[in-house]
Image (spheres, helix red, strand yellow):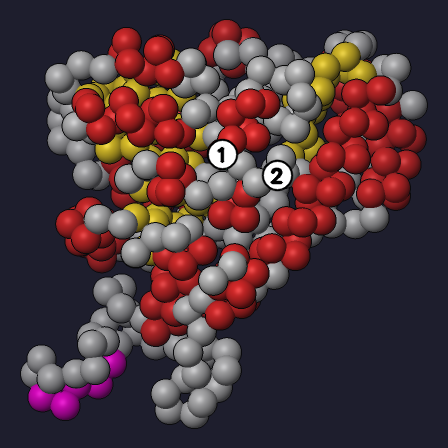
């Protein structure tokens, strides 16, 4: 079955008590049992909830996975993967990634004696060189936030297999519409469903998808034992959002392409980061593992002075200055002071994230209106 059909029908079975076509919001904390232990598979809502179950089935289907698990946020999903590890284990992680993941690794998990080795994962040889007998997990994000660097998932999966380590891919930027890491050999896919999956900037949620039953059991145990579960209303919102993922993504990609090429020709723009440029470093790999190039774009102005960057950031009208991404409305963001402020400045600069970098989450408005808005702001 093709993605468009799967997305519409994923996790959707008529409600058994009424036939309701949309899964109801089961706003309940507990379920009445006929006798101790005699129940319909639902005991307590931290462990099971029918709205969450419908969404978790949908999560699995859209990533070609056997299993899906929902968490109260993207970072809660990442945190749950870290709980698979033991003190002394090593993680190889991408040096260019979401600031909140970096903060979780360095400020929380390092205190529990998990060692993180940061490498530029765009070159698989760097990952191979960092492998030791203690490597238990490789954490990759592609395209990266905010520099759009591309990592070869298949190559890293090969390294993970031979090292007997798990590979987890943060697939938030691509969404399942553009890329399916499990098909390329990854063990776990993670998403901030807050972004493209929810798609309407109205919910915080995260998820993990996997094929291995043993891994699913371990992660389900962590989900119910540690308790970072989303509520049924939030699950309903994501379930509803997913139904239009393919239609939204098609427009995000078309608008992204148009705006990326336009920006590149603008006399006041120095560099544009977007994986669809044929001369960009990651193009060949992006072309191989992605179906299109998405609506996330970063760029630098020729005039890098702080007040000029700030002027542009506060001069758009259709692009709202805000953190987050992947919603139907366009957003503009300053990674150095907003989404990536939790990364120390020296580390940011070392990874190529300049103080003047501007990130766009291109929405699904009319591309010409968006270009006019940017043109007025850049001047
Ligand atoms: C937003 C984001 C996260 C964190 O997700 P939350 O839902 O905000 O907790 C993780 N990875 C990437 C790439 C993100 O953009």
Q: Is residue 213 above or below residue 123?
A: below
Q: 204 or 144: nearer the eye?
A: 144
- The reply to whether callout 1 and callout 2 are in contact (CB within 8 Å) is no
Closer to the camera, 202 or 256? 256
Q: For label 2, count other residues whose C-alpha is less than 10 Å away and answer few (under 14), some (14-19) or many (20+).
A: many
Check the image and name the residue furthest to the left: 36
Which residue is the site of mark 1? 289
Is residue 113 rendered magenta in the image? no
Q: Position of residue 97 (x, y in %)?
A: 46, 25
| Residue 142 to residue 354: above or below | below
In what quadrant of the picture does the C terminus appear? top right
Q: Is mark 1 on a helix, strand or loop?
A: helix
Q: Is 264 on the left or on the right of 250, as rendered?
A: right
Residue 143 percent across, percent down from the top left: 52, 30
Residue 220, image quadrant: bottom left
The span picked out in magenta is 31-35
């Amino acid at each position: 079955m093709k993605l468009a059909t799967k997305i519409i029908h994923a996790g959707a079975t008529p409600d058994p008590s009424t036939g309701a076509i949309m899964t109801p919001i089961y706003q309940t904390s507990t379920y009445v049992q006929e006798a101790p232990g005699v129940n319909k598979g639902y005991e307590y809502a931290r462990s099971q909830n029918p709205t969450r179950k419908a969404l978790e089935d949908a999560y699995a289907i859209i990533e070609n996975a056997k299993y899906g698990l929902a968490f109260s946020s993207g970072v809660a999903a990442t945190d749950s993967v870290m709980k698979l590890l033991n003190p002394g284990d090593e993680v190889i992680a991408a040096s260019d990634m979401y600031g909140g993941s970096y903060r979780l690794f360095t400020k929380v998990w390092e205190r529990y004696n998990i060692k993180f080795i940061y490498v530029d994962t765009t070159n698989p040889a760097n990952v191979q060189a960092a492998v030791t007998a203690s490597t238990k997990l490789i954490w990759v994000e592609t395209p990266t936030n905010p520099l759009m660097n591309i990592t070869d998932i298949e190559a890293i999966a090969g390294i993970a297999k031979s090292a007997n380590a798990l590979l987890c891919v943060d697939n938030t930027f691509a969404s399942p519409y553009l890329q399916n890491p499990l098909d390329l050999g990854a063990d776990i896919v993670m998403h901030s469903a807050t972004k493209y999956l929810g798609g309407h900037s109205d919910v915080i949620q995260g998820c993990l998808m996997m094929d291995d039953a043993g891994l699913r059991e371990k992660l389900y145990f962590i989900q119910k034992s540690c308790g970072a579960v989303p509520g049924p209303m939030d699950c309903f919102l994501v379930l509803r959002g997913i139904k239009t993922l393919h239609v939204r993504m098609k427009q995000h990609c078309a608008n992204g392409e148009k705006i990326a090429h336009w920006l590149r020709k603008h006399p006041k723009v120095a560099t544009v980061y977007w994986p669809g440029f044929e001369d960009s470093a990651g193009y060949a790999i992006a072309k191989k593992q992605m179906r299109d190039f998405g609506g996330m774009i970063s760029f630098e102005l020729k005039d890098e002075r702080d007040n000029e960057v700030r002027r542009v950031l506060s001069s758009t009208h259709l692009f709202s200055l805000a953190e987050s991404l992947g919603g139907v409305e366009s957003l503009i963001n300053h990674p150095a002071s907003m989404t990536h402020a939790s990364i120390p400045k020296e580390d940011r600069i070392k990874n190529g994230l300049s103080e003047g970098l501007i990130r766009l989450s291109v929405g699904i408005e009319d591309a010409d209106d968006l270009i006019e808005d940017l043109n007025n702001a850049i001047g």
